[in-house]
Structure formats: structure tokens, C-alpha cells
């Protein structure tokens, strides 16, 4: 047994309170980073005005970190080699905190974009590593629940992080919102250092391992499912507000409470799907795909009143809330001995699909109508069933 393997054996997870505290702290890290990625959405107008650019140009502060994260997710695990993952995660959170400190004081749009590049590196790298950590922090029987907690940070960011950041920005200025998120990053940094155990690299990711993952039919199917599901969702979700207004007749004053309800449904979906995916991941993704496609496709037909619009919105949130944890479980089951490599590929596709969905959705809305983007999203989500079938044929996934 090598020194690395011996060290890893000594770090096998045990059922301790510290292990669960570590899981929750990693979830808080995901929460902060997803909030960081999406925070400018509600602050584009004052941010663009302060930095002397149009709202359209200011939108780059959202696009850039998503694209950078897609690149960082597969590359960073290769670059860090055998570094202790505890220090890598802490360093990535510190990078996010520093980038927000710079963003809060800059008056230059170029400097702001450079800071957002650092946010993208933090998101892609942290997610790629954190996605598979449950295997090392808790016993095997608790991995599905721990994975659901980690990815509960995504839903919590949508429910609490982004609305709260927008509210702070509205009260005290967008700079205050960025500074507050940077401060939260510092607190999470201290918590990570306090509760995370040593996490030496058991199998440093090499370029060949990423290629080997792509040669695995189950991993390829999982990446395809991620691309289709996330692209379809974000093509429609990016234009949720005009859909509720134009189709359901819901005024803009109700958007905040409705997004909160959507997020609460998403959190519920995250934990329900996390438990189900631990038992049968392909069946869970099958149900999620059908439910999400149904909610999207029925919205233009049945969501023509405020009541039916809200009902379909809740169903939408409940279905999509289970996507992240179920896809992550898929990748862990497909490549249990190469968790970082498979998770990095998954994270890369997830972030790329966010950007692609928003871009394609914008084209459809301009060319057709908002109802067109809902049907496009439903069609892409339904195509996920082909990926589920591919994985079923490959075998080895339960």
C-alpha cells in the first residue's frame, strides 16, 4: 500500500458529528458560490450605471463566471494534483471572498470582469471537488442524504441568497451586497478550516482520466442528460418573469413571493429526489424528466390564470429541485473510483448548459414568443429520456 493509500485509509469517514458539520459547511460554500454567480442579476441596472456601461454589457458579469466555471471544473482537479482538498476548498472560498472585496470598491468595469473571472474559477473548482466529498465525510449508507444536503446549497441560494443580496443592494447599494457576500465567504473559510478533516488526494485527476471517463457509456450518458436537462430548464427559466406576466397575467409585484415559493418547492424536490436517487437513480431521473417536461409544456396551455400559473410554477420548482442531486448521484454511481474526474465533467457541462440555455432561450423569445421557449425547454428535457435509456443499456446503474 502506498503512502497516499495509507493516508486515505486513515481518513475513511466515520459517523461523527464533525463529519456532518463538514457536510453542512461544504453546503454553505456551495450556497455562497451559487449566490455569487447569480447575485448581479437583480443589480444589473445600478451596477451598469455605476461602472458606465449598458445593462446589456453589464450582463457579462453573469455570463463570464458561468463560462469560466465550465472551463475550471475539468482543469482545476488536474492542476491541483495531490494537494489536500481541505486546503483547496479553503483557497477557492478565499478567492471568492477576495474577488467580492475588489468588486465592492472598483469603479472600473474591466476590473469587475477580472474579479468575476476569479468567481468562475471558484465556482467550477469548488463544485467539482465538493460534489464527491460525501463519500469521504460520512459512511456509505449516509452518502445519498449527505449529497442532498451539499446540493441543498444550490436551492437555498435561489431561495435566500439571491433575493437577500438583491434586497441589501436595494437598501444600501450594490457595493454593499458584494461586500456582504465577501464577508460571508470569510466566515465560511474559517468554518471549513475548523471542521474539514484532512482530505489527501487518493487519486489525483490526470487528463487521461477525464478521457477515460468520456469513454464510459454511463458517464457519457450522464453528461448528455445534464446538458439536455439544464439547457432546457434555463432556456425557459431565464424568461420566467415574462412567462408569468404574459401568460398567467401575474403582476411584477408578485414575482418575489412567487420565486420564493418556487425555491421552497425546489428545496423539497432536492431532498425527496436525493433519497430516491440513492435507491434508483435512473428511475428518479425518468420521473424528474417527465414531470419537468409536463410542467413546461402545459404552462402555455393551462397556465393562463394566476392560480394555474402558480400551480405549474410550484410543480416546475419541485421537479427541477431534484436535478442537481440526482445527476450528481448518477455520476458517483457511474464512476465511484473516479469521483473527482466524473464530477468535474458534470460540473463543466452544468455551467456550460446554463449559459447555452439562456442564450438559446433569448433567440427563441425574440424570434417566436415566450411560449415558444417553454415548449423548447420541454422538448430538450424530454430528450433526456434517451440518455436514461443509454445508461440503462450500459448497465451497472441502480
Image: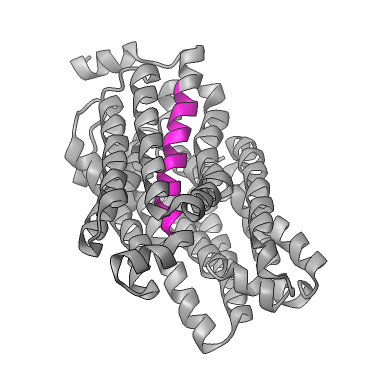
User: Per the image, is 31 magenta?
Assistant: yes
The quarter of the image holding the N terminus is top left
The x, y position of residue 89, in whole percent, is 31, 32
Tell me the chief SS of the magenta region: helix
Position of 165 relative to 378 (above/below): above
The x, y position of residue 105, in whole percent, is 27, 50
- State the colouring used for the structure image: one colour
Specify whether 380 is left or right of 257.
Answer: left
Position of 366 relative to 389 (above/below): below
Position of 1 relative to 327 (above/below): above
Quadrant of residue 49 within the rendered picture: bottom left
The reply to whether residue 303 is visible in this rendering is yes
Quadrant of residue 55 within the rendered picture: bottom left
Q: Which is more toward the observer, 17 or 101?
A: 101
Start-end of magenta stretch: 22-40
Specify whether 162 is left or right of 57.
Answer: right
Q: Residue at x 40, y 30 (%)?
A: 133
The x, y position of residue 130, in whole percent, is 39, 35
The x, y position of residue 87, in whole percent, is 26, 27
Q: Tally the numbered discs.
A: 0
Q: Residue furthest front?
A: 172
Q: Which is more toward the observer, 58 or 269?
A: 58
Q: Which is more toward the observer, 333 or 376?
A: 376
Q: Residue at x 49, y 44 (%)?
A: 330
Q: Residue at x 50, y 85 (%)?
A: 366
The quarter of the image holding the C terminus is top right
User: Per the image, is 177 magenta?
Assistant: no
Amino acid at each position: 500500500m502506498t503512502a497516499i493509500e495509507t493516508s486515505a485509509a486513515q481518513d475513511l469517514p466515520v459517523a461523527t458529528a464533525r463529519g456532518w458539520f463538514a457536510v453542512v459547511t461544504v453546503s454553505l460554500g456551495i450556497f455562497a458560490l451559487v449566490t455569487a454567480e447569480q447575485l448581479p442579476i437583480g443589480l444589473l441596472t445600478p451596477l451598469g450605471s455605476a461602472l458606465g456601461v449598458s445593462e446589456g454589457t453589464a450582463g457579462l458579469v453573469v455570463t463570464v463566471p458561468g463560462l469560466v466555471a465550465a472551463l475550471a471544473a475539468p482543469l482545476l482537479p488536474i492542476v491541483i494534483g495531490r494537494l489536500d482538498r481541505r486546503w483547496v476548498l479553503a483557497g477557492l472560498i478565499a478567492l471568492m471572498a477576495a474577488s467580492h472585496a475588489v468588486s465592492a470598491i472598483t469603479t472600473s468595469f474591466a476590473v469587475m470582469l477580472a474579479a468575476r473571472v476569479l468567481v468562475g474559477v471558484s465556482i467550477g473548482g469548488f463544485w467539482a471537488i465538493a460534489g464527491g466529498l460525501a463519500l469521504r465525510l460520512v459512511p456509505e449508507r449516509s452518502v445519498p442524504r449527505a449529497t442532498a444536503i451539499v446540493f441543498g446549497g444550490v436551492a437555498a441560494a435561489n431561495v435566500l441568497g439571491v433575493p437577500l443580496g438583491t434586497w441589501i443592494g436595494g437598501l444600501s447599494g450594490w457595493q454593499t451586497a458584494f461586500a456582504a457576500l465577501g464577508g460571508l465567504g470569510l466566515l465560511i473559510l474559517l468554518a471549513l478550516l475548523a471542521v474539514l478533516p484532512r482530505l489527501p488526494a487518493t487519486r489525483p485527476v490526470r487528463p487521461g482520466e477525464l478521457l477515460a471517463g468520456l469513454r464510459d457509456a454511463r458517464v457519457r450518458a450522464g453528461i448528455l442528460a445534464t446538458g439536455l436537462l439544464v439547457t432546457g430548464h434555463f432556456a425557459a427559466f431565464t424568461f420566467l418573469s415574462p412567462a408569468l406576466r404574459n401568460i398567467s397575467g401575474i403582476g411584477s409585484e408578485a414575482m418575489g413571493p412567487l420565486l420564493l415559493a418556487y425555491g421552497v418547492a425546489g428545496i423539497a424536490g432536492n431532498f425527496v429526489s436525493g433519497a430516491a436517487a440513492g435507491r434508483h437513480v435512473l428511475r428518479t431521473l425518468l420521473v424528474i424528466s417527465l414531470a419537468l417536461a409536463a410542467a413546461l409544456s402545459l404552462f402555455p396551455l393551462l397556465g393562463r390564470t394566476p392560480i394555474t400559473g402558480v400551480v405549474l410554477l410550484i410543480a416546475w420548482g419541485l421537479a427541477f429541485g431534484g436535478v442537481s442531486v440526482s445527476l450528481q448521484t448518477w455520476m458517483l454511481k457511474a464512476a465511484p473510483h473516479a469521483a473527482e474526474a466524473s464530477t468535474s465533467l458534470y460540473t463543466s457541462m452544468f455551467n456550460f448548459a446554463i449559459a447555452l440555455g439562456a442564450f438559446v432561450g433569448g433567440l427563441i423569445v425574440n424570434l417566436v414568443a415566450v411560449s415558444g421557449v417553454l415548449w423548447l425547454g420541454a422538448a430538450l428535457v424530454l430528450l433526456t429520456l434517451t440518455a436514461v435509456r443509454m445508461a440503462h443499456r450500459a448497465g451497472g446503474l441502480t
